[in-house]
Image: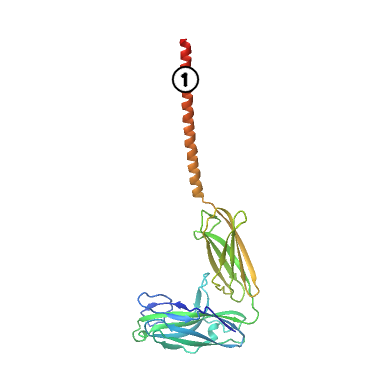
């Protein structure tokens, strides 16, 4: 059964000025020309059976003002880092039991598109009988180049891909944990803040054999146990691939002072599994407190000086009056 997500077309504009006959392996933007490739869908999720044969389609649109020649390829991919960015494994030599690259064949390897035109490209997926159960990941890659590059070796190229997430039937292991959850101050883990905003880092580790979409909330409570905020985590429903850790960043920016506890609760998987973690921290505006204490201390000091001066003046006035009375009594 095929499920295609992100029906809304995602525009991927990627330009690289090339001065070589070698293929370009970069995604970039050019400010000098409106070059680009539009693909729909951007992600395909396929629930597959071992031995199954499936047909997928991708619509490619040349959104540029000039004609482009396209090359089509299929590659495996994995997570590049904790941001979830894909790392394309070009010309990978993975075993066929796990390599999507060996399962997928495009209907065409090259084609031409006039400016502002589109074309639907089919991909035939043949899942081997000995495919390992769980998740397998590939990218349906399209590289477009200016028609002049073949003649001169100089031109503009653009590249984009549709991600393919295949779930092969069998023993599926959905297992994840919160690798770490903490508050961040100036890019570093901290339990002390002068003021808000406070950033939270949630790192989810997938130890299963299938991709997951953890989602949930961070509940923030103050020192009295009252809920200050409920912050959604992974609203975009991003995937965490097997054998990887993905980081989710959240920020709370509100008035804060005192001790706080933050608890992240995430659900994932087909059985509604739940994972949790907590952290606590202090928010103390010490600079403001020190300033207030200094002002109060200065005011106390000034008031005491005024009081001392006033007392001295009263005593002096009293002594002068007493001395005057004594002088008058002696005269009498």
Residue 113 location, quadrant: bottom left
Q: Position of residue 30 (x, y in %)?
A: 38, 75
Q: Position of residue 45 (x, y in %)?
A: 56, 80
Q: Nearer the viewer, residue 317 or 46?
A: 317
Is residue 124 positioned above or below 300 on the image?
Answer: below
Is residue 120 positioned above or below 192 on the image?
Answer: below
Q: Is 28 displayed left or right of 197 in the figure?
A: left
Q: Residue at x 48, y 39 (%)?
A: 299
Q: Position of residue 149 (x, y in %)?
A: 36, 84
According to the image, label 1 marks what residue?
321
Q: Nearer the viewer, residue 318 or 63?
A: 318
| Element type where label 1 sits in the image | helix
Q: Residue at x 50, y 44 (%)?
A: 293
Q: Position of residue 177 (x, y in %)?
A: 62, 68
Q: Residue at x 63, y 72 (%)?
A: 175
Which residue is at the far top? 332
Is residue 315 positioned above or below 2 on the image?
Answer: above
Q: Is 19 displayed left or right of 217 in the figure?
A: left
Which residue is at the far bottom? 107
Q: How is the image coloured?
A: rainbow
Disc 1 packing (10 Å; few <14; some 14–19; many ≥20): few
Residue 26 location, quadrant: bottom left
Q: Is 306 displayed left or right of 242 in the figure?
A: left
Image quadrant in which the N terminus is located: bottom right
């Amino acid at each position: 059964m095929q499920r295609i997500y992100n029906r809304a077309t995602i525009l991927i504009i990627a330009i690289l000025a090339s001065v070589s006959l070698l293929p370009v392996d970069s995604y970039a933007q050019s400010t000098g020309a409106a070059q680009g490739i539009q693909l729909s869908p951007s992600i395909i999720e396929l629930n597959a059976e071992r031995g199954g044969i499936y047909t997928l389609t991708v619509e490619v649109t040349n959104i540029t003002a000039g004609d482009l020649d396209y090359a089509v390829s299929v590659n495996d991919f994995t997570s590049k880092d904790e941001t979830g960015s894909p790392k394309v494994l070009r010309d990978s030599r993975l075993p066929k039991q796990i390599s999507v690259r060996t399962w997928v064949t495009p209907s065409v390897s090259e084609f031409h598109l006039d400016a502002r035109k589109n074309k639907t490209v089919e991909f035939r997926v043949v899942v081997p009988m000995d495919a390992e159960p769980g998740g397998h990941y590939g990218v349906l890659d399209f590289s477009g180049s200016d028609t002049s590059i073949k003649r001169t070796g100089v031109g503009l190229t653009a590249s984009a891909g549709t991600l393919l997430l295949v779930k092969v039937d069998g023993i599926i292991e959905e297992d994840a944990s919160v690798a770490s959850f903490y508050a961040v101050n100036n890019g570093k883990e901290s339990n002390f803040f002068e003021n808000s905003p406070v950033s939270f880092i949630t790192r989810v580790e997938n130890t299963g054999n299938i991709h997951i979409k953890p989602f949930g909330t961070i509940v923030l409570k103050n020192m009295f146990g009252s809920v200050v905020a409920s912050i959604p985590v992974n609203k975009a429903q991003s995937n965490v691939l097997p054998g990887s850790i993905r980081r989710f960043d959240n920020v709370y920016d509100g008035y804060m002072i005192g001790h706080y506890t933050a608890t992240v609760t995430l659900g994932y998987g087909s059985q509604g599994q739940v994972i949790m973690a907590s952290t606590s921290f202090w928010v103390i505006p010490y600079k403001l407190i020190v300033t207030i204490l200094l002002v109060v201390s200065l005011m106390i000091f000034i008031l005491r000086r005024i009081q001392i001066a006033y007392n001295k003046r009263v005593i002096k006035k009293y002594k002068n009056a007493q001395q005057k009375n004594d002088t008058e009594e002696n005269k009498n």
